[in-house]
Image (cartoon, grey):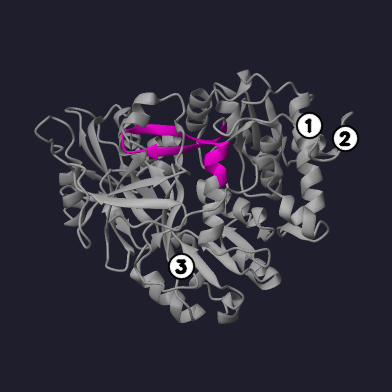
Amino acid sequence: MAPTGLELDQPAPPLPDLLGKGLKSTPDQIAIVSAERQMSWRELENASATLAREYLALGLEPGDRFASLMPNRIGLVIHYLACFKAGLVVTPLNYRYTHREIDHALGVSGASILLAHSERAEDLAASELVPDLAFGTITYGGDRETRDAGAISFEDLLERKTAAADEPATAGFPRRDGRDPAAIFFTSGSTGPSKGVTHSNDSLRWMIASAGAAFELSSEDVFLPGSSMSHIGSFLWALSTLAVGGKVVVARTYDSHELLPLLREHQPTVLAMIPAALIALVRDHDLQPSDFSSLRVCRSGSDSVSTELLTEFAATAGFPIDEGYGMTEVGLATLNPPSGVIKQGSIGQPIAGYEIDIRDDEGNQLDVESVGRVFIRTRSLMEGYWEAEDATAEVIFDGWIDSGDLARTDEDGYLWFFGRKKQVIVHDGSNISPQEVEGALDEHPAIEMAGVVGVHDEVHGETVRAYVTLRPGAESPSMADLMVFCRDRIGYKAPEEIVVLDEIPLNPTGKIDRTGLKRMAEEHLHPHGLAH
């Protein structure tokens, strides 16, 4: 029988009213805090309502996609809440995107406006689509004196007072249907450039409620999401905490210089980080065991958590890491129960509102302890990939989504992760498509063919390794030059290692044999030398 989480009685509050519990019970207590600023529930509600009215006053209409290119800031949370109130579709972009990737996401989503941090001005200037956005760009941060004439700033919008400013914060906003899109997240699959994962108002509300139940969140909790709120994980951790009236601590960066003061001053009860950042924190020479003393749970995921990290964290903190599993398409799907048994190395049990099937390649349900493909059914399932019906149909069947990942279930209903059947590479919590990296390499005049795989890494989850063949007669480039060439095109997705082969192995259909390359990588075969 498929493992199933508990039933949920109801979803989270409507997205425009997400702050309702905190507003009603403790309106003047702190709802959100960072090293820079703090805001009460009343201040957060009023700021998001003001911003929502200003967004609509620009001419935006419900359903318009509002892209953001932002690091973690309290302002980003205000922006999300404002979009929910105004009926706009939040469209977060990975903050590490290059100008080409920014253009891809803007083109796919049809976004008509962009909120971007001022430090990304160079990439925006190199973009082909940003100058033609219907409602332009709103700039976050930077000096007012250096802004372009006529530029709209996020800070200025928050200071404005429209004619409706004296109305109650929740008044006068359009209401959208439950199935209307509320958010588009971009995630790389194994078959090419990023697709827009589209969540509706309803799917987000169920997802928020499930995450809150999984972490056993209450108004007494203080949650520190130690990763990007432009990705589904920390986006979800922040909103699920606010929905139950808990406090959110915003980490602007994920290094110990930022995190240790936040841990010490705000005493979070829940911490969530990707493994690469968490192991760096655990190994920081300034860390004291007491820095984790306020925590009741530390969740790590997005990448596989190494045995080394499990051991070092438990030795330092005195309690184990809680692993889970999720996808942008469904949110958090499994977690070791925080107040129950935490099985080290397991990704836990299905959380409330989720059902999981382990199936073979023919779609048959497998017995306990058998490794198979992970299928998930939940009311938190995405509506589909934005304007990509064929891609959606490839993964959703009769209400179930095929994750492409492999796992087994034990006798107690805990799941154990066995890797990705898809060939997507997961590096520091971000998905990287092998084809996208290969495409960048193929643009180089000296490269005849390229094949790309992920190689297991204790710190980063996986690193990107490329195998290439050179064109006959072409001048052999240095590996360093090849890496720079790729970084100019695909940024952080560029390979960390490049191996030159006499020929790339092909499968019987003539396609690149990534399984063979993966095997080669695992056997550490480096025929013509490896560039690091």
Marks 2 and 1 in Cβ contact (< 8 Å) = yes
Q: Earlier in the sequence, mark 1 or mark 3?
A: 1
The answer to whether 74 appears left or right of 424 in the picture is right
Q: Quadrant of the N terminus?
A: bottom left
* Extent of the magenta region: 181-205
- Residue 239 lies, in percent from the top left, at 62, 51
Q: Amino acid at mark 1?
A: Arg
> Which one is closest to the eye, mark 1 or mark 3?
3
For disc 1, the neighbor class at 10 Å (few under 14, some 14 to 19, many from 20) is many
Which disc number belongs to residue 337? 3
Measured Cα–Cα span from mark 1 to mark 3: 41 Å
Residue 183, magenta (yes or no):
yes
- Residue 439 lies, in percent from the top left, at 32, 30
Q: Is residue 171 above or below residue 527?
A: above
User: Where is mark 2, residue-wise?
Assistant: 165
In this view, the residue in front, 296 or 496, is 296
In this view, the residue in front, 109 or 435, is 109
User: Where is mark 1, residue-wise?
Assistant: 53
> Which one is closest to the eye, mark 2 or mark 3?
3
Which disc number belongs to residue 392? none
Does the rendering let one see residue 233? yes
Q: Amino acid at mark 2?
A: Ala
Q: Is residue 170 above or below residue 518?
A: above
Q: Residue at x 61, y 49 (%)?
A: 12
Element class at badge 3: loop
**Chief secondary structure of the magenta portion:** strand
Indicate the quadrant where residue 223 lies. bottom right
In this view, the residue in front, 48 or 98, is 48
Q: Residue at x 69, y 40 (%)?
A: 16
Element class at badge 2: loop
Residue 30, magenta (yes or no):
no
